[in-house]
Amino acid sequence: MFSRAQPGPATPRAARWPTQCELCRQWTLGDALCGDCDARFAAPRWRCARCALPAGTAVARCGGCLGAAEPAFDAAVAAVDYGFPWDGLVRAFKFNGRVELADTLAARLASAVAAAGPHGLPVAELVLPVPLAPGRLAERGYNQAWELARRVARTRGLPADDTLLLRPLETAHQTGQGRSGRAANLARAFMAEPTRRGALAGRAVALVDDVMTTGATVGAAAQELRRAGAASVQVWVFARTPAPGAA
C-alpha cells in the first residue's frame, strides 16, 4: 500500500493524456512544455553548489558565497532560473490550483538533482517538503512543495515524508521583503515533529521547495532539521530567483 512517507509507483509516460504546450500550443504527451520549448527554456546551466545561482562553471562556492556566512544547509540545487516561462507556470501551480503542473516541474527538478550528484552533492536518504502553516494549507488546499517533493522522491527511489517538519506558526508572506525581513519573519517558524525527532537523527535530508529567493525560508527550515539531529541538509528547489541586478 502506498504510504505518504514512501515513494509510490511511477505513472508510465505512455499512460498520460495528451495536452497542449503551455507556450506554443503544440501537442505534447503529459508535459506542460513541448520538446522544442523545453530545449529553448530548460537548457542545463552551471550553478554554485552552495546557493544555486548561475555560475560560469561548476563551483563549490561562487564569488558571492566566498566569505559569506555559512547557511544551515550544505548544498543547493535548482532546475531553472525564476523567469519566463517558469515564473508563470510556478504562479499557476502555486496560486491557481494547477496541481497537474507538478509533474512537469518535478521532472525537471529530478533531472537537475541527478546532474548535480557527480559534482559533490551529498547522498540524500530522506526527502521532506518545506511545510505550509495550517491556515495557508487550508486556504490553498495543497502544499506545492510536497507535490514536488513526493514526485522527485519517487523518481529518485527515496522515501518522502510531509509530517516530520511542521510550520505551526502563521507568518506574513515573504513576497516583497528583503533578506533581513524574511529572516525575522521566519524566526522559529518551523518545528520538527516532537514525537518523531528520532527519524531525523543522523539522516541526510533533502529539503524541497518551489522557489528560492534569499534562502531565508529553506535556511530556517534547515536550521530546525539540524537542531533535530539531521546529519546534513541539502536544498532542492525548482526555480532560483536571479541575484539583484542580474540579467
Image (tube, helix red, strand yellow):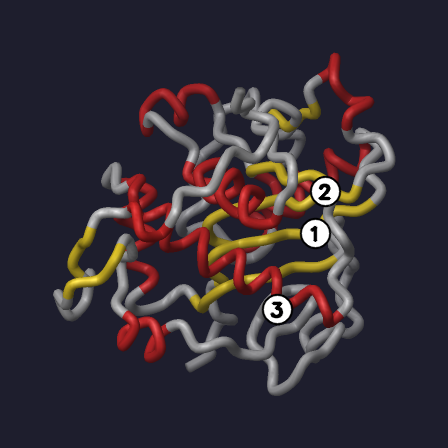
Q: Residue at x 50, y 62 (%)?
A: 240
Q: Which residue is mark 1?
A: 234
Which residue does the image show at 30% across and 69% down from the upper left? 84
Q: Is residue 198 left or right of residue 102?
A: right
Where is residue 83 drawn, in percent x and y?
35, 68
Q: Residue furthest bottom?
A: 56
Determine which residue is flagged by label 2. 205
Residue at figure coordinates x 59%, y 78% from the top left:
46
Q: Secondary structure at mark 1?
A: strand
Lower position in the chain sequence, tag 2 or tag 1: 2
Q: Residues within 10 Å of mark 1 (few under 14, many from 20)?
A: many
Callouts 2 and 1 close, C-beta under 8 Å: yes
181 vs 95, nearest the viewer: 95
Residue 14 pos. (x, y %): 31, 52
Taking the image as shown, residue 104 lies to the left or right of residue 109, namely left
Counting other residues with Cα less than 10 Å from the Cα at mark 3, is it few (<14), some (14-19), or many (20 or more)?
some
Q: Amino acid at mark 1?
A: Gln
SS label for mark 3: helix
Write down the quadrant of residue 167 in the picture: top right
Q: Which residue occupies 67% across, 46% down?
A: 206
Q: What SS does tag 2 mark?
A: strand
Which kind of residue does numbered mark 3 sit on? Answer: Ala
Image x and y of residue 172, in percent: 45, 34
* Circle 3 residue: 115
Indicate the amino acid at tag 2.
Answer: Val
Marks 2 and 3 sit apart, C-alpha to C-alpha, by 18 Å
User: Compared with residue 86, is residue 152 higher up or lower down, i.e. above or below?
Assistant: above
Q: Is residue 172 left or right of residue 49?
A: left
